[in-house]
Image (cartoon, grey):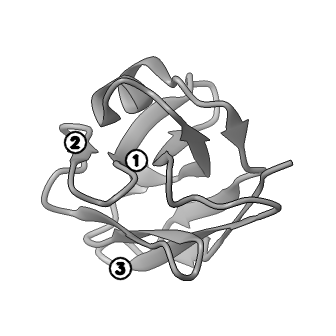
Amino acid sequence: QLQLVESGGGLVQPGGSLRLSCEASGGTLKYSAVGWFRQAPGKGREGVSCISSAGTYTYYADDVKSRFTISRDNAKNTVYLQINSLKPEDGAIYYCAVGTPTSVQDLCVNQAAAYWGQGTQVTVSS
């Protein structure tokens, strides 16, 4: 069964950067769309960014556009999320998830995922 492991989270000052990684085992990511989601304390989970299987199509939530970049390396079975210009409101647990949605927007907006990782904590504070 496919397993996803996120890494790269941590404590960072406002304006800083992080690169999150989502590595898969027990299966291949190359035929699946992959998304990054986050959940802050007291809030619902939201789709942040999603990428199609070949990396051709991407989706970003409005509040992260121009600051977040999603990418993937299918040879390494890994998807990345580069986060720049971090804001306190970006603090959350970040999850990656895999699905075969109709579109990357479907994956991100409707959270149409079949497999989820355990998450990595991102804290933004001075």
Residue at 36%, 23% (x, y): give it: 102
Q: Is residue 104 left or right of residue 119?
A: left
- The quarter of the picture where residue 16 lies is bottom left
* Residue 75 vs residue 98, the one in the foreground: 75
Q: CA distance from mark 1 to mark 3?
A: 13 Å
Judging by the rendered image, the residue that carries numbered circle 2 is 63
Q: Amino acid at mark 3?
A: Gly
Q: Which amino acid type is marked by label 1? A: Glu
State which tag comes first along the sequence, 1 or 3: 3
How crowded is the residue under tag 1: few (<14 C-alpha within 10 Å), some, or many (20+)?
Answer: few
Q: Is 18 positioned to the left or the right of 66 in the image?
A: right
Give the crowd class for mark 3: few <14, some 14-19, many >=20 residues within 10 Å.
some
Which mark's residue is nearer the viewer, 2 or 1? 2
Using the image as rendered, state which of residue 69 and residue 28 is in the foreground: 28
Tell me which residue sits at (71%, 39%) in the image: 115
> Circle 3 sits on which residue?
16
Q: Residue furthest left?
A: 66
Circles 1, 3 touching at the beta carbon (< 8 Å): no
Q: Pinpoint residue 90: horizontal percent, then vertical percent.
A: 42, 52
Q: Nearer the viewer, mark 2 or mark 3?
A: 2
Taking the view exactly as shown, the residue that stands out farthest to the top is 110
Disc 2 residue type (three-letter): Asp
